[in-house]
Image: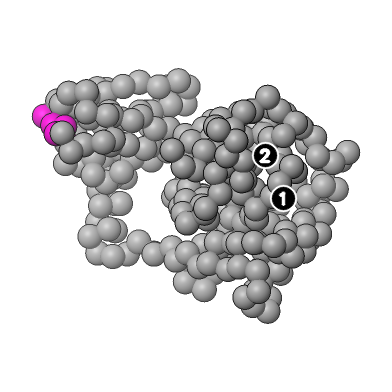
Amino acid sequence: MTLIVRDPGFHEPTDEDDCAVFSYFCQAHDRFYQREACGEGPHLIALHCEEHGFEYMWAQPLMLMFPAGFDPPLSGVQLSRLQTEWDAVESNVTRVIDLRDYAQGSIPEGFKQMLIDVHADAYADAMDDEFNQRFPWFVDHWSGMDGFTCVVAFDGDEPTGFAYGAPLQPGREWWRSTAFAPNNGYTATYAVSEVMVRPQWRGQGISERLHEALLKERGEDLAVLLVDVTHPKVQGLYETWGYEKAGEQQPFADSPVYAVMVKRLHA
């Protein structure tokens, strides 16, 4: 699914380098592809999706600094797209996505409806599914849980996506029904219930930013989330965020079968 391309003259790792990550977005797959380069010699590693072709990649404007280092070479279409993105960055045309934190006890009026509206847009093509129609119930349930936290992304005053969750009670962690074995009994678990971005704002890394902000200061040992087993690309995305599949479960009779994904929060 990927091709490694190198430019030996671009990056020379030093002893201070831990890991450099280069990400590129495939429009057809609607996901990022990543490759980690951990000081194994002078290199640049970039990836693209071979199934849909090099032209589908949303590359970073930084690539304009070393266009000759790519094999196959960057095309005129790609260079034009990169130049447009570079000019936008240089002129501050690119809108800044603002992340705002919310927590139980400090939820403003209209907050729940805002989440419901974002969900309706994100799942506009699947709102005939009865399970998706129950989302307002889930908003009420989760926002009432002890320790509930939420991060919402805004483009100006427009909410573009959100992530929320809460700590799970001891003994009721979602991974309990799987073969997952915590390290040395460290079992405190934060459940990431939802991560979603409205279609107009996808492909900008917002979901990853939301997820990172949600877990940034968590004191639990583990994070857990569920992903529909019929969406392997989404599961693959979560794996790049540090999750591993522990098993499968169907929490409700009318819900999909989910892969249980676990992430260790502390080494």
Main SS class of the magenta portion in the image: loop
Q: CA distance from mark 1 to mark 2?
A: 17 Å
Taking the image as drawn, is residue 146 in sight?
yes
Q: Residue at x 68, y 31 (%)?
A: 259
Q: How many marks?
A: 2
Give the residue furthest to the bottom.
109
The one nearer the camera, 201 or 219, is 219
- Using the image as rendered, state which of residue 2 and residue 107 is in the foreground: 107
Q: Position of residue 14 (x, y in %)?
A: 14, 34
Residue type of the residue flagged with mark 1:
Gln
Q: Nearer the viewer, mark 1 or mark 2?
A: 1
Can you give x and y, in whole percent of width and height, for residue 121 in the image? 66, 57
Q: Which residues are magenta?
A: 9-14
Magenta run includes residue 12: yes
Pick the residue in front: 244 or 168.
Answer: 168
Q: What crowding class fits label 2: few (fewer than 14 Cα within 10 Å), some (14-19), or many (20 or more)?
A: many
Residue 207 percent coordinates (x, y): 51, 50
Instruction: Locate residue 168, reporting x and y percent.
Output: 69, 50
Q: Secondary structure at mark 2?
A: strand
Name the outermost residue toward the right. 253
Give the residue pinned by disc 2.
226
Helix or strand or loop: what does disc 1 sit on?
Answer: loop
Most distant residue in the left direction: 9
Q: Which residue is mark 1?
A: 169
Is 176 placed left or right of 52 in the picture?
right
Marks 1,2: beta carbons within 8 A: no
Can the viewer see residue 237 in this picture? no
